[in-house]
Image (spheres, rainbow, N blue to C red):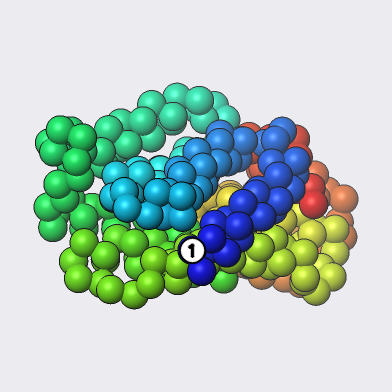
Amino acid sequence: MNGLATGSMVLALVPFAMAWRANRATTLRQPLLWALMAWFAWLVAVGGRVFRAEADQTLTTYLALCLTGCSGIAVLGARRPGVSAWNFVVVGLLAVLTLPILQGLGEVRLEPAQAGFLAATITISLLNYLPTRLAWGAVCVGLGCGSELARPWGWDAPAWLGTFMLALAPWLAWLGLTIRRTPRSSFDHMWLSYRDRFGFVWGQRMREQFNRAAHHAGWPVELRWSGLRPPTDSAEMLATLRAVLKRFGPDEVAD
């Protein structure tokens, strides 16, 4: 079963490749690099359970958990200018999260407070995507990470169960973006694509910026989380939304 779980993790690189192709020209490029590092760490951890079943994979699993949290936090700084500088913040976070390894001189000595901080980091990262079409993917990541994080505290579920949850997450995220109702307008198409990729934190801020611009322009519309109300295909409003989102990259609204 562990071998099948490892194979499913490898196959999950396919939606990662599609995500990279769709977002490589946006400010999500660097969070995706963090996510890929986390995924390769997971591959090393689950692969070790197959090819080196007698070896302890606690270290690699813990590193994978840390990198997973860092990839989500990287999204919170994914706006120009400052997207590159935000990586220093993420690196600092990674240094704090890996303190249990340094304190254990290469072994993970995780105190309850440190485990709580890691869990909070991952939770914040995932909550950012719960109001989007990536929600089911975020839930699976949460279940997979939660099962691994709880293992040192007595969780005795099969290791492959958490691995399958993680492997399922990229596919569910891809399906969430692919299988959807046709937006009412070009404006909603652009907005929903941006909202789902960048999550609640940036989506809410950009929604507020557009609504302020619409209020000053005297437009009788409101950008809600689900789209513009009343729906419209006004070229002027579309241009305003593009201007609001321009710091996130030229392809931030592409499919």
Q: Secondary structure at mark 1?
A: helix
Name the one closer to the observer, 196 or 242: 196
Residue 195 makes an appearance in the image: no
Is 240 left, or right, of 64 in this rendering? Answer: right
At 70% from the left and 35% from the top, the residue drawn is: 24
Dividing the picture into quarters, in which one does residue 131 lie?
A: bottom right
- Residue where numbered disc 1 is placed: 2
Is 68 left, or right, of 249 in this rendering? Answer: left
At 75% from the left and 35% from the top, the residue drawn is: 250
Percent x, y for residue 149?
29, 60
From the viewer's perspective, is residue 5 above or below residue 19? below
At 72% from the left and 33% from the top, the residue drawn is: 25
At 32% from the left and 36% from the top, the residue drawn is: 94
Please, what is the three-letter code of the amino acid marked with disc 1?
Asn
The tally of labels here is: 1
Name the one closer to the observer, 250 or 7: 7
From the viewer's perspective, is residue 14 above or below residue 31? below
Residue 107 makes an appearance in the image: yes
